[in-house]
């Protein structure tokens, strides 16, 4: 078993400016280690860390980028704001990030070390963190292509973490068996942003003239999507347009079902999403029921609600447990087809929006970030 680093430590969007090894090293209050790119789909890390950077200086370190031989052991530094910098290392592996850190980082006594992935645990002993936080937003060990040693790395990270946050109730129930200081913070929402879809904003041209009705999804399109379910449902409803918005990850374009009424629009910016939601008649979450989705708590559930859209989802545990009163849950293509027809014909919009209102009043990214920071402050006293 690895030794507990804390034992030894007790005694102790958007401006885009890129620079390559020509920025003086700086002092930071918090270092964030994340498996997701800052410029990827805007989700939990971006929401929370951008808010926390308002009162502390943050260096957000991504997994290594691909690089040329000439670029090896360098990095790009992206300046999001004065207080938020994104480091994109060009090194052979995560452990090698240690080689380039002195070029960018003056201090190794850091108030907070914030981990989104245990894959960064080999860097733990480089720092003297006052508080180590593991914000477990997904069970990455169950994802397609997960490294075999990620399970051991997570054990090591949790042995050294002071605080563990989880992105949903299922994850909380799993992690609290392994750590004594775990808090559940399900995905939240920027309600004002997505509520723009309720107003007179413009529907983007690439869906404005589609055959209606439109059943839409936005988010990463990967092994967690039930492509067979999507395909079968689209065949049953040839007069409905199925719109998939988001980047592909860990699957190929050849894996996608191809029908005239299924459209893949690629990734859109966070700013544009309310406009696309405006064009949806029904919002969907066609997730496969698998190990990879066993612990997910989709952020988009609340974003769809804020836009006032009827929602259809497969029976993801956290969705079924928390939102069955207002989300239509399906298992098969027949279920999916019937739910779409029923929602288009019979949705009581007023009742639906009242149910959404009750849910949305209890959460926001602002309040989640504030509560997390209060927990950290209490622990640090």
Image (cartoon, helix red, strand yellow):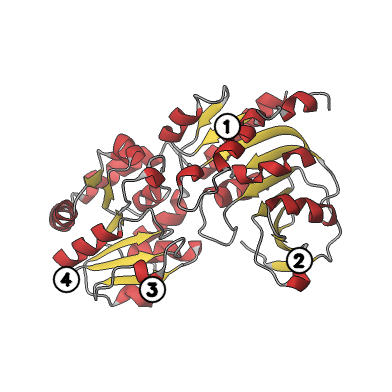
Count neighbours of disc 4 (C-alpha within 10 A) and say few if under 14, some if 14 to 19, many if 20 or more: some
Give the quarter of the figure containing the N terminus.
top right
Percent position of residue 373, x then y: 63, 34
Crowd rating for badge 3 (residues with CA inside 10 Å; few <14, some 14–19, many 20+): some
Q: Could you classify mark 1 by the number of other residues whose Cα lies within 10 Å: few (under 14), some (14-19), or many (20 or more)?
A: many
Q: Where residue 324 is drawn, which disc sits there?
A: none
Q: Nearer the viewer, mark 1 or mark 2?
A: 2
Pair 3/1: label in front: 1
In primary-sequence order, the first of circles 1 and 2 is: 2
The CA span between labels 3 and 1 is 40 Å
Compare marks 4 and 1 and give the one earlier in the sequence. Answer: 1
Residue 243, how many percent across, how many down? 31, 67
Sequence-wise, the earlier of marks 4 and 3 is: 3
Cβ atoms at labels 3 and 1 below 8 Å apart: no
Say which element carries label 2.
Answer: loop
Q: Are marks 4 and 1 in contact (CB under 8 Å)?
A: no
Q: Which residue is mark 1?
A: 164
Using the image, tell me which numbered label, if any, was put on residue 204.
3
CA distance for labels 1 and 2:
34 Å
Distance, label 4 to label 1, CA atoms, is: 47 Å
Q: Is residue 371 left or right of residue 283?
A: right
Q: Tell me if residue 10 can be seen.
A: yes
| SS under mark 4 | loop
Can you identify the residue that label 4 sits on?
Answer: 239
User: Which percent across, then down, holds residue 88?
Assistant: 69, 60
Residue occupying image coordinates x 59% and y 58%: 37
């Amino acid at each position: 078993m690895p030794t507990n680093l804390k034992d030894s430590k007790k005694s102790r969007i958007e401006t885009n400016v890129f620079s390559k090894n020509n920025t003086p090293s700086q002092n930071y209050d918090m270092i964030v280690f994340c498996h997701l790119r800052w410029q990827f789909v805007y989700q939990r890390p971006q929401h929370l860390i951008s808010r926390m950077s308002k009162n502390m200086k943050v260096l957000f370190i991504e997994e290594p980028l691909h690089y040329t031989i000439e670029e090896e052991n360098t990095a790009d530094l992206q300046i999001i704001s004065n207080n938020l910098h994104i480091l994109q290392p060009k090194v052979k592996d995560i452990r090698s990030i240690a080689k380039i850190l002195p070029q960018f980082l003056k201090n190794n006594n850091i108030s907070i070390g914030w981990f989104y992935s245990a894959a960064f645990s080999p860097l733990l002993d480089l720092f003297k963190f006052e508080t180590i936080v593991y914000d477990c937003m997904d069970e990455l060990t169950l994802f397609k292509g997960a490294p075999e040693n990620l399970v051991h790395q997570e054990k090591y990270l949790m042995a050294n973490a002071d605080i563990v946050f989880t992105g949903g109730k299922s994850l909380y129930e799993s992690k609290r068996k392994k750590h004594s200081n775990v808090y559940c913070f399900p995905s939240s929402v920027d309600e004002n942003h997505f509520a723009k879809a309720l107003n007179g904003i413009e529907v983007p041209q690439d869906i404005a003239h589609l055959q209606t009705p439109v059943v839409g999804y936005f988010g990463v399109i990967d092994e967690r999507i039930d492509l067979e379910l999507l395909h079968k449902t689209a065949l049953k409803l040839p007069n409905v347009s199925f719109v998939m918005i988001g980047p592909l990850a860990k699957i190929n374009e050849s894996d996608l079902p191809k029908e005239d009424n299924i459209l893949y629009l690629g990734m859109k910016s966070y700013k544009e999403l309310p406009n696309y939601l405006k064009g949806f008649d029904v919002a969907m979450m066609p997730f496969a029921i698998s190990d990879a989705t066993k612990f997910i708590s989709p952020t988009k559930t609340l974003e769809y609600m804020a836009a006032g859209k009827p929602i259809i989802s497969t029976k993801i545990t956290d969705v079924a447990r928390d939102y069955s009163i207002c989300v239509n849950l399906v298992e098969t293509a027949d279920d999916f087809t019937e739910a779409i027809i029923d929602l288009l014909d019979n949705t009581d919009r007023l009742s639906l929006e009242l149910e959404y209102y009750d849910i949305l009043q209890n959460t926001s990214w602002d309040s989640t970030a504030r509560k997390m920071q209060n927990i950290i402050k209490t622990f640090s006293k």
